Amino acid sequence: MTSTRPFSPSTRRDFLKYTSAFAASGGFLLRELSAQDAKFVTAETTYGKIRGVDSNGIKIFKGIPYGASTAGANRFMAPAEPAKWTGVRDALEYGHSAPQRDPAAPPPPAGAITISGQGLPAEGEDCLVLNVWTPSVGSGASSGRKRPVMFWCHGGGFASGSGSSPDNDGTNLARRGDVVVVTINHRLNVLGFANLSEFSRDFAASGDAGMLDIVQALKWVRANIPEFGGDPNTVMIFGQSGGGRKVETLLAMPSAKGLFHRATIESGAAIKVIDRDVAVRNSELLLAKLGIEKTNVRELQKLPVEKIMAAHFAVIKEHPGVDQATAGFSPTVDGKILPQHPFHPNASPVSADVPVMIGCTRTEMTLFSTNDAAAFSLNDDQMRGRVKDLLGGPALGIVDLYKKLNPSASPSDIYFLIASDYRYGAPTMKVAERRAALGQSPVYLYYFTWETPVQGGRLKSPHTMEIPFAFDNVKISARMTGGGAAAMALADKVSDSWIAFARTGNPNTPKLPSWPAFNAKDRATMVIDNVSMVVNDPLREQRIAMFQAMNLA
């Protein structure tokens, strides 16, 4: 039931202190409410009542527990239900980010452009929390209207990040689209994906615990989102980078089937995750680094989390093959929780009836090179050397092809185009192809080519670029977008398209050209820019060459 009341003087002081802290950290800038319109709002969940704030008509609840703490005896286990509470629990501040920092490393410099956001809350194992932005809460308050739910999976690979990033603030999206926005935190890296199943049956779920957390959050949505004006039968999961890979993994998980009804994958291609034997090997390295015998694996639950994280980073540094994408602490194909790779050898049929929207940006890899000044001033020989390191034998032919197709591009431009297509473009196109081959639901493919003016324009169309446009947060994310008129105009179109897809399973809106579904013959692709257009197979020659170089049949 909705309940609003003015703040008392002492509570208002606390509230303004709280909003000022978020403003200082780069978070959503709640307007300084007057004593007359500053209000709490309460909602009923299956675990107890929560108190949020009403900001100019958007109700905001932060740090809502959807699972119990993952510390101690719950570490490496499937998520458990949170304890119920009495009274009204404050949901005014973000909860813990999942542990992800190397205890021995300094924090990133202030103002650094990061994939996972900045100004994030403190880390902790009590991190199974979610946040909700909604135009309405409470039984009857929404006049029976059922709003689409946009459920965000954050980026940062499977290793880092948080749903509490200022870039993921759902206020503008909820207001623009009359939708309910949900962002979540869940276990990451070694705590979410160390596969200990070989050493104890008690840890049978450990290799996919972080994904099971997301399933647990989706179950919370199914049970509770009507109280927040949301429709549990119209849920879109969407995510960028690692978040996109989480979306793809959810598409292949039987336990997630039926909990979502559309899926959007932004610059994240998880054709494969990791096989069980590789995952177990990585866990053996972790145990060895900690000096724990396999027969005593439960000792991991007794260690300080900082010690486990330190060992995790030491293993990665000492064994370069243990990365977070396909050979590290990330989801495991175990035959049960995850029966097969998401898109290998074919697309998983588990949620074949769910419409999918997928795409990538033109120069994804410029973001990863912001601390590599040399990458932006390569000569031809240096560029060819880097491409050879990336592709091996096929490098010469690939370079010549890209130079022919981009005659005015500098050597650095050529390198970024090739590296971006290798890491993201080609896998994205293959995912679209394999998903469409299931023939049970539409697939919509996009290619984001808008270039940001920040840093003198050198980043062009970098990784993470879709996020501020999908969330309509180009002002909040001005460090990535510049926050100018062109960015605002494009966000108006992109946000509406994402909202349309969440509502109907079709991204078409009057603000963009007619966007047909993808098929392997025409390969219709929405090229997103100041002037967007649909182009059939816009990277045909590059795609064919990359598929051959990467053995993507």
Image (spheres, grey):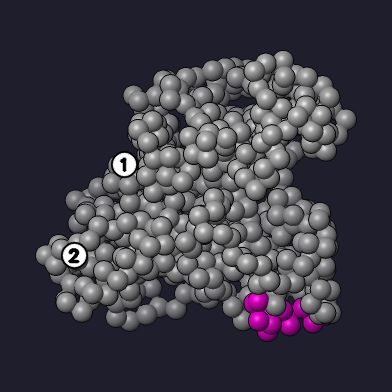
**Quadrant (top left/top right/bottom left/bottom right) for the N terminus:** bottom left
Location of mark 2 (residue): 38
Distance from Cα at disc 1 to Cα at disc 2: 24 Å
Residue 276 horizontal/vertical position (percent): 78, 57
Q: Which mark is residue 177?
A: 1
Magenta span includes 397: no
Q: Residue 166 vs residue 350: left or right?
A: left
Find numbered disc 1 in the image and state the secondary structure of the residue it sits on: helix
Q: Is residue 250 above or below residue 449?
A: below
Residue 2: name its quadrant.
bottom left
Q: Report the span colored magenta.
A: 295-306
The residue that appears at 47% across and 19% down in the rendered structure is: 533
What amino acid is at disc 1?
Answer: Gly
Residue 490 horizontal/vertical position (percent): 39, 31
Residue 310 horizontal/vertical position (percent): 71, 72
What amino acid is at disc 2?
Answer: Ala
